[in-house]
Structure formats: C-alpha cells, structure tokens
Image (tube, rainbow, N blue to C red):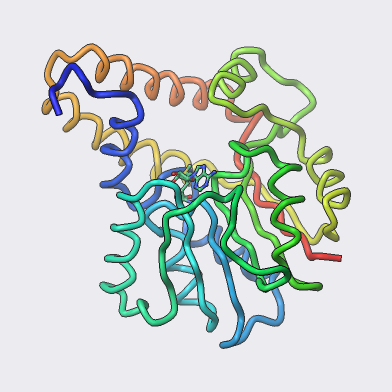
Amino acid sequence: MKNKDITIFDLLIETHKSLERQGPGSPEMTLRALSFVENLNENSRIADLGCGTGGQTMVLAQNTAGHITGVDMVPDFIDIFNNNAKRNHLEGRIAGIVGSAESLPFGKEELDLVWSEGMIDGIGFEKGLAYWNGFIKRDGYVVVTCPSWLTSQCPSAVEKFWVEAGSGLDTIEYNISVMSKAGYRFIAAFTLPENCWTENYFIPRAAAEKSLAEKYNGNQTVKAYIAQDKYEVELYTKFKQYYGYVFYIGKKM
Ligand SMILES: C[S@@+](CC[C@H](N)C(=O)[O-])C[C@H]1O[C@@H](n2cnc3c(N)ncnc32)[C@H](O)[C@@H]1O
C-alpha cells in the first residue's frame, strides 16, 4: 500500500493489532464482572462479541470451564486472537471467528453468557441488548461495558466527541432501565477505574502511535489520526469525572 492511500481505518487496525486490548479495561475488572455470573460449567456456551485480539477473552477462558466463541469484524484481530488462544493452550475451548455482532451465527437460546467489552455503543445499547437476548438461554447472562455519563452534567465537548465517534452517551440510571426493557433483570453495574483507560489503553496506544509516526514520517492522514487520539486523551483527562466505561450485568428474564 502506498503511504498516500492509507485510511484512518487502516491506521486504527495497524495501531490496535499490537495492543493487548483495543479499548479500556483490565483483567481485574473482567473478573469482577464475571463474579456476578452464576451457574457456568464445562458445558456452557459463551460468546465474546467485539472480542478484538482477545485480551478479555483469555481471562474469561482461564476463569470459566465452558466454550467461548470470539466474534469480531476485523480479520487481522481474529488471526491474532486465534494465535493467542494457541499460545495460551486454550484453542480447544476458545475460537475466534470473523463476523458481525448484528448478525450472529448462533441458534435461538444457545448461549449461557454474552460478553462484550467496548463495542455495544457502536450498535446502540438497547438495540444490541434486545438482539442478543434471543440467543441467550433463560436465566443466562449478558455482560457489557458501555461508555456512560457518570453525573447529570454532560459537558458538550464530550457529547460532541462521542456523537461524532458514532455513539452517544446515556446515564447509568437510564441504561439500567433499558436493560429491563430489553428483557433482562438488572444484576449490577460498576465504573471502570482510571487505570483501565490510562495504563491499559492510552499509554500503550501512544507508544504504538509513536512507531506509526516514525514509519509514516510526514504522512498527513497519520498526523490527523494521531492528533484525534491525543484529543481523546486530553478530553478524558479534563472531563473524566463526568463519563467513563461502565460494566452492566443482566440476567435474561
Ligand atoms: C473498542 S474495541 C474493544 C475490543 C476488546 N473487546 C477490548 O475490550 O479490548 C471494539 C471491537 O469491536 C469490534 N467491532 C465493532 N463493531 C462490531 C460489530 N458490529 N461486529 C463485530 N465486531 C465489531 C471492533 O473491530 C473492535 O475489535
């Protein structure tokens, strides 16, 4: 590919391929969310939607006995996911497939648990929860993270950023009410701490983007891409008390 042909999407994939995770999160918070999920065993079927390269999927697999299917629309991420599964000797229990979380290859009420970190906002919280509900067994669980307002004040710069990124933010209270409309009993919600954004995502991403800037020295698309990510970090630093990623755990009614 010639440098001038590079798109923002190419750069997003190139940067995120090298990262442990493709969004804010941590093994500790994945395990905290998992602690609310009951009745999993070696026959359980789990789907991790928008799994990326599988940072959280490996944690899930190491702490549950069932079978996990990771679904992501980016083939490069799924290749790395499946290599990571092999490296962790988990390939018998987890498999990554390329696909859309809006057109799932599972049967009706086949799944005990649908997991999804950092993706549902792109589909819409209510739309995603309602669609996935049909694939979950009665008394099965849905566990998602979604960027949310943490206070009743909503700074307009933050609102603009997330709307332009393709999703809007709602309050935790509102999202909890949406869960029951989508057919789940609300179990728990908690906010990801700051280190999930900074140490686990922004800092490794900035390091990857430093290499990107060196590789594509002077390329305007690369400069614009990196500037946009720097703005995201500035916004979070300034307004982190108003918004964050929230884990929502629900049980299918
Ligand atoms: C913010 S990243 C989170 C990745 C990973 N879950 C994590 O927390 O590190 C969102 C992921 O969802 C994937 N994705 C976005 N929309 C999707 C869709 N409709 N179907 C499948 N994957 C999707 C992206 O390719 C990306 O890997």
Quarter of the image that includes the N terminus? top left
Q: Position of residue 186 (x, y in %)?
A: 83, 57
Looking at the image, which residue is at 45% across and 76% down? 62
Q: Is residue 230 left or right of residue 69?
A: left
Q: Is residue 69 left or right of residue 126?
A: left
Q: How many numbered discs sit on the rendered protein? A: 0
Is the residue 74 above or below the residue 133 in the image?
above
Is the residue 122 above or below the residue 234 in the image?
below
Quarter of the image that includes the C terminus? bottom right
| Res 223 → quadrant | top left
Q: Position of residue 180 (x, y in %)?
A: 87, 52
Looking at the image, which residue is at 51% across and 72% down? 68
Q: Is residue 171 left or right of residue 163?
A: right
Looking at the image, which residue is at 40% across and 42% down? 201
Q: Position of residue 78 (x, y in %)?
A: 36, 56
Looking at the image, which residue is at 18% across and 15% down? 219
Q: Position of residue 124 (x, y in %)?
A: 68, 37
Closer to the camera, 128 or 206? 128
Residue furthest to the bottom: 42
Closer to the camera, 24 or 17? 17
Is the residue 9 above or below the residue 231 in the image?
below
